[in-house]
Image (cartoon, grey):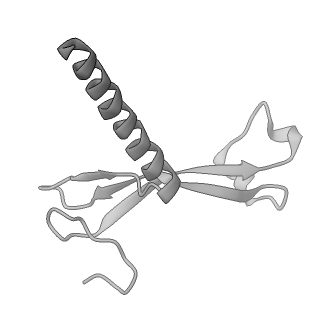
Amino acid sequence: MAKKGEIKCPKCGSLVRVMVQATLCTDGKYYANFTKRNLRYKESYLNSVNWETADFLCVNKKCRHVTNGLGNYVSRLEKELAKLKLQTSERKTHVQKGR
């Protein structure tokens, strides 16, 4: 049973696991040899998370559906703008050929 705020698979309704890109801030001494153990130290902390590129993986072994990225309104607008520009250039090409 999913708790309030938990994300469910859009295909089968099972719970999902989230894979997300994270930015860590840490001391320079860990540069050459950063390990999971270094995350325990106070010099290392989570700085930010890029939810736009998150992947949601269904935990149901029969489904295994993957939903790619939440995105944000800026990236959606950029994609929509690119589509509109392509449509406009195709119309201009079509009109020029018709002359």
Q: Quadrant of residue 40?
A: bottom right
- Above or below 34: residue 61: below
In this image, 53 relative to 57: left or right? right
Q: Is residue 95 above or below residue 51?
A: above
Q: Is residue 91 above or below residue 25?
A: above
Question: What residue is rendered at 45% in x and 54% in y?
Answer: 71
Quarter of the C terminus within the rendering = top left
Quadrant in which residue 33 is drawn? top right
Q: Position of residue 51 (x, y in %)?
A: 51, 57
Residue at figure coordinates x 43%, y 51% from the top left: 76
Tally the marks.
Answer: 0
Residue at 24 percent across and 22 percent down: it is: 95
The image position of residue 6, as x and y in percent, is 37, 77
User: Residue 66's x, y, as percent?
Assistant: 27, 51
Q: Nearer the viewer, residue 26 or 5?
A: 5
Q: Where, quadrant-wise, is the N terminus in this rendering?
A: bottom left
Of residue 50 and residue 64, the one placed in the foreground of this image is 50
Of residue 68 and residue 16, the one placed in the foreground of this image is: 68
Q: Is residue 99 left or right of residue 51?
A: left
Q: Residue furthest front?
A: 99
Residue 43 on image: x %, y %: 85, 56
The image shows residue 49, relative to residue 8, as above or below, that is: above
